[in-house]
């Protein structure tokens, strides 16, 4: 009977602390709006910027414009370019300066004098493709222009062989064909690689302020000591604070996931809109994968901040955790050697890897999910035990 009353008292204390901390975290509207704008709005905004860039490249590709200097020197080349439905535009006199200043968005094809005469004599006259590696718009057009010139080169070679009675097939010693093994889901996931990172950062920044405010913030304001004078068990107080912090972090993550659903409406490129695959199923899977990570992050941040006397000191101490959890997901993004088994054991990296599998449409097995859950659970237990021990000590002043 006594044990039952103690359990009910501990449960009541847990819910009281949980509701109080949750209300305090949501009441700070300035901090909450900052977190929402930085963690929730930034993903769709970056998606919009990427789609704008791709849409601009597509628009330029559809325009089919070639900027040429000395076009009068090459009527044969001009005929070929026009037959490929390209529009020819004379280069400005100061095209080099405009390319360096990024005022000119297309590379310039420079045709030297004597080009047509060299072509008639059977020689290989040279042309020059001028661009600037610092001008991204112009640099993007270099590849298509070079492929166009190679097509002209092949056409002239075939005509020369035919004039000499040689079969054009003699140029093809080997026929090369390409085959892409990636399915549509894998190709679409390449565009969505940014989504797991932004969602992960939403959990991190969502839990940060709540964790610091519920520990170091209360200690600085002097409201932690009266709470500890309450006869409620220390474990109930710690669990109530931790649950509130984890809930705030997970709430921001849910909002971040949901923001990408209407964010797809902002895609200005039809190709990207067709490739971007992130629906309600992916959002639910993301949230489920982030639950253990949110719990571990909340406990770890509380453990770091509980020994700090001021909020600013806690912010400085949490920088290492912020940096580590921000850099770990980048291993999955920049990894060129495929997923390794140890990736599933590292917090943040494991969740990023698993979310990538969700975007590719691959199955999530228990063998892949459980390592990250186990490590997150272990971190949570160790951090909460440390927080409870600090609160029981007499060092709080």
Image (cartoon, rainbow, N blue to C red):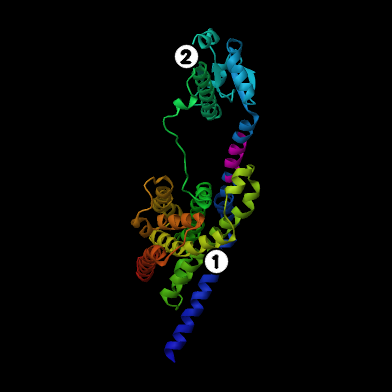
Query: Around disc 2, counting alpha carbons within 10 Å, would you say few (fewer than 14), some (14 to 19), or many (20 or more)?
Result: few
Query: Of all residues shown, which one is farthest toward the front?
Result: 165
Closer to the camera in the image, 111 or 385: 111
- Residue 18 colored in magenta in the image: no
Q: Main secondary structure of the magenta part?
A: helix
Looking at marks 2 and 1 on the same chain, the residue that comes earlier in the sequence is marked by 1
Task: State the mark number for residue 124.
Answer: 2
Query: Around disc 1, counting alpha carbons within 10 Å, would you say few (fewer than 14), some (14 to 19), or many (20 or more)?
Result: many
- Residue 53 colored in magenta in the image: yes
Quadrant of res 94: top right
Which segment is the magenta one?
47-56
The residue under label 1 is 22
Query: Of all residues shown, which one is farthest toward the bottom?
Result: 1
- Circle 2 or circle 1, nearest the eye: 2
Closer to the camera in the image, 321 or 115: 115
Residue 95: x and y, percent? 57, 17
Residue 21 visible somewhere in the drawing: yes
Q: Is residue 8 above or below residue 348?
A: below
Residue 106: x and y, percent? 58, 24
Q: Quadrant of the C terminus?
A: bottom left
Closer to the camera in the image, 179 or 16: 179
Q: Residue at x 38, y 70 (%)?
A: 388
Distance from label 2 to label 1 (Cα)? Answer: 76 Å
Q: Quadrant of the N terminus?
A: bottom left
């Amino acid at each position: 009977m006594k044990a039952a009353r103690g359990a009910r008292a501990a449960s009541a204390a847990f819910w009281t602390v949980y509701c109080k901390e949750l209300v305090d975290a949501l009441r700070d509207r300035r901090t909450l709006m900052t977190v929402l704008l930085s963690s929730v709005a930034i993903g769709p905004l970056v998606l919009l910027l990427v789609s704008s860039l791709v849409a601009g490249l597509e628009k330029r590709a559809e325009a089919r414009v070639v900027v040429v200097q000395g076009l009068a020197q090459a009527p044969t080349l001009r005929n070929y370019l026009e037959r490929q439905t390209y529009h020819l535009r004379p280069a400005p006199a100061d095209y080099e300066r405009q390319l360096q200043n990024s005022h000119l968005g297309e590379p310039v094809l420079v045709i030297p004098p004597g080009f047509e005469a060299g072509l008639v004599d059977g020689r290989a006259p040279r042309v020059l493709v001028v661009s600037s590696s610092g001008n991204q718009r112009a640099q993007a057009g270099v590849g298509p222009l070079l492929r166009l010139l190679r097509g002209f080169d092949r056409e002239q070679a075939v005509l020369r062989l035919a004039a000499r009675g040689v079969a054009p097939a003699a140029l093809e010693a080997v026929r090369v064909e390409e085959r892409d093994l990636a399915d549509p889901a894998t190709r679409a996931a390449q565009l969505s690689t940014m989504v797991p990172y932004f969602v992960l950062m939403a959990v991190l920044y969502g839990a940060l302020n709540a964790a610091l405010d519920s520990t170091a913030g209360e200690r600085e304001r002097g409201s932690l000591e009266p709470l500890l004078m309450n006869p409620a068990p220390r474990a109930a107080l710690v669990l109530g604070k931790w649950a509130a912090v984890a809930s705030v972090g997970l709430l921001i993550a849910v909002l971040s996931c949901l923001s990408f659903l209407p964010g797809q409406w902002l895609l200005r490129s039809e190709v990207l809109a067709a490739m971007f695959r992130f629906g309600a199923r992916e959002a639910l899977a993301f949230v489920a994968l982030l639950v253990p990570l949110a719990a571990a992050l909340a406990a770890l941040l509380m453990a770091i901040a509980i020994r700090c006397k001021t909020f600013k000191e806690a912010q400085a101490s949490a920088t290492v955790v912020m940096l580590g959890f921000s850099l770990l997901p980048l291993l999955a993004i920049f990894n060129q050697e495929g997923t390794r088994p140890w990736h599933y054991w590292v917090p943040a990296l494991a969740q990023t890897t698993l979310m990538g599998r969700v975007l590719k449409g691959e199955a999530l097995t228990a063998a892949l999910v459980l390592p990250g859950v186990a490590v997150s659970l272990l971190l949570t237990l160790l951090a909460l035990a440390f927080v409870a021990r600090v609160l029981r000590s007499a060092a709080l002043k």
